Amino acid sequence: MYWLLVVASVFGPMAIGFFVALRGTVRGWARMPWLIGWAYCFIPACYLSFQSLCSHISGTCPSSSGLKTAEEARVALAALLLGLVVLGISRAVSSVGARAACGIAFMVLVGFSELWMYSRLKEQDGGIAGFLCLALLAWALLAEFAAYRAARRAARLEHEHEHAGHDHPHEHDAAPGSTPA
């Protein structure tokens, strides 16, 4: 019976993270960098949070400081799960303002989780896993900046297109070479 718990605790977070990242990207739940950041942080947050189950599974547990770090990962796990709830709410509301607020809340929750997991993973092993959280956050922020700049440029071009040729409204009324009556 414990083997089922082991399989679920190892492969469950991977499957959920993959599903959220893939489905969310295809369905347009949020921008891809935020969804990938969510999925990447979800997996170690689950693994660290599930370390307290070790006495039931194998009988050998990490040290008490390792369990403390593992318990602190539950903060990120809670924020990530709350972010998923916020995404669900954003799909259910019809107001553009409410959707924008949910999108911002999702980004804040994922960003917080990435920073939180960076600090926990750095304490845990000091390896590249924590720095990948920061890299994913930087990628997401750069993607937001690029999207903002593209939207501003599109709005500017649309504004210029609307006002092109309207500087002299009566110029086109008269035929070339004629005098207005």
Image (cartoon, rainbow, N blue to C red):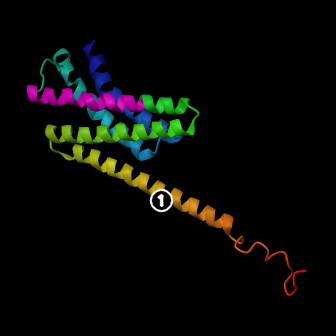
Horizontal placement of 57 versus 161: left or right? left
Q: Is residue 63 visible?
A: no
Residue under the point 43% across and 38% down? 21
Query: Residue reaching furthest top?
Result: 1
Q: Which residues are magenta?
A: 64-84
Query: Residue reaching furthest front?
Result: 181
Asked if the stretch drawn in magenta spans residue 75, the answer is yes
Task: Using the image as rendered, state which of residue 147 and residue 170 is in the foreground.
Answer: 170
Q: Position of residue 140 (x, y in %)?
A: 38, 49
Where does the N terminus fall, quadrant-wise? top left
Residue under the point 14% across and 26% down? 67
User: Looking at numbered disc 1 in the image, what kind of residue is underneath it?
Assistant: Arg
Horizontal placement of 181 versus 72: left or right? right
Residue pointed to by mark 1: 149
Q: Position of residue 11 (x, y in %)?
A: 33, 28
Q: Is residue 80 visible?
A: yes
Dot 1 falls on a residue whose secondary structure is helix
The answer to which quarter of the image holds residue 7 is top left
Residue under the point 32% across and 34% down? 42
Task: Using the image as rendered, state which of residue 178 and residue 10 is in the foreground.
Answer: 178
Horizontal placement of 31 versus 170: left or right? left
Query: Residue reaching furthest right?
Result: 181
Q: Position of residue 77 (x, y in %)?
A: 30, 29
Asked if the stretch drawn in magenta spans residue 19, the answer is no
Q: How many marks?
A: 1
